[in-house]
Image (cartoon, rainbow, N blue to C red):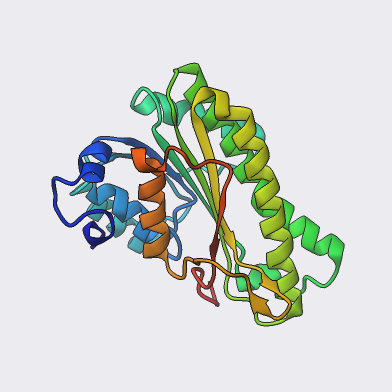
Amino acid sequence: MYMGRVGSSPESEIVRELNGARVLITGLGTTGGVDIARAFADLKARLIVHTTDLSPEMTALIALMSQSASEIKLYTDPITSADASVRFAQTAAQAYGGLDAVINLQTISAGDMTGVASEAAVDRLVSDKLTPLAHLTSVTANRMRVVLSEGLILNVLTMPHPENGRETAIAGIARTALAAMTKAEAQTWAQHGIRINGVGPRVLMSGAFTDGACLTNEPDVAALAIYLASKRGRSLSGHVFDCDGVAARGD
């Protein structure tokens, strides 16, 4: 499914390079992150997967990925505090002796935006969504530093395409906050060879989308994550890539 995006030959450079890579994926759910997780599993990465989705569909997905991934370890305890993030990051990093890539997934759903009618409410919503990503970024980057492991951390924040001014404002504030966090963390960890990038909601400017490429579905995000995790993406850090409509309305 994904080989056409990263190289048609099974002997392609990226396929060989990411075979056995130690990849942590957090926030996986049946409504978000499936294509990303399957993409790394298809490349025979060693996966550490965190999810609080205990549905039969998730159980079936993990079973399917275990057939293609080199190894897979599953964690289901909630990560609801900075201390929990530290403990989880330590456990995840120890699973395979280090981490080569970390993909943190977060979604602002249509339900999350219902009733958000003030600037303070928007700020609370964005903070609630980005704070776990900030904790995970900091602690996983520190674990990479401790074991002298260079790698990628990619924070993916998605939401449905905005349908009104309120949702457009939420998208704009969320992307601005994600960009500021990404830039600051990239500067902090650059000296250790740790790259920090993000994927965030595309923002409407003067009634039209900004120019440039935009990720419009999860396979696009999966292909970007694979590229950034490979040697080809090692010159990229501190960037936020635009996405629009990756999260379906009604999630």
How many marks the image carries: the answer is 0
Query: Observer-nearest residue: 15 or 64?
Result: 15
Q: Is residue 181 left or right of residue 93?
A: right
Residue 153 locus on image (x, y percent): 50, 40
Residue 10 locus on image (x, y percent): 14, 49
Q: Is residue 249 left or right of residue 71?
A: right
As drawn, 147 above or below 113: above
Q: Is residue 60 left or right of residue 241?
A: left
Does the rendering let one see residue 80? no
Q: Is residue 203 left or right of residue 64?
A: right
Residue 73 locus on image (x, y percent): 33, 38
- Residue at 86%, 60% in the rendered image: 120
Query: Observer-nearest residue: 245 or 133?
Result: 245
Q: Quadrant of the N terminus?
A: bottom left
As drawn, 207 above or below 12: below
Residue 21 locus on image (x, y percent): 30, 35
The quarter of the picture where residue 188 lies is: top right
- Residue at 14%, 53% in the rendered image: 9
- Residue at 23%, 55% in the rendered image: 64
As drawn, 76 above or below 243: above
- Residue at 22%, 57% in the rendered image: 3
Does the rendering let one see residue 156? yes
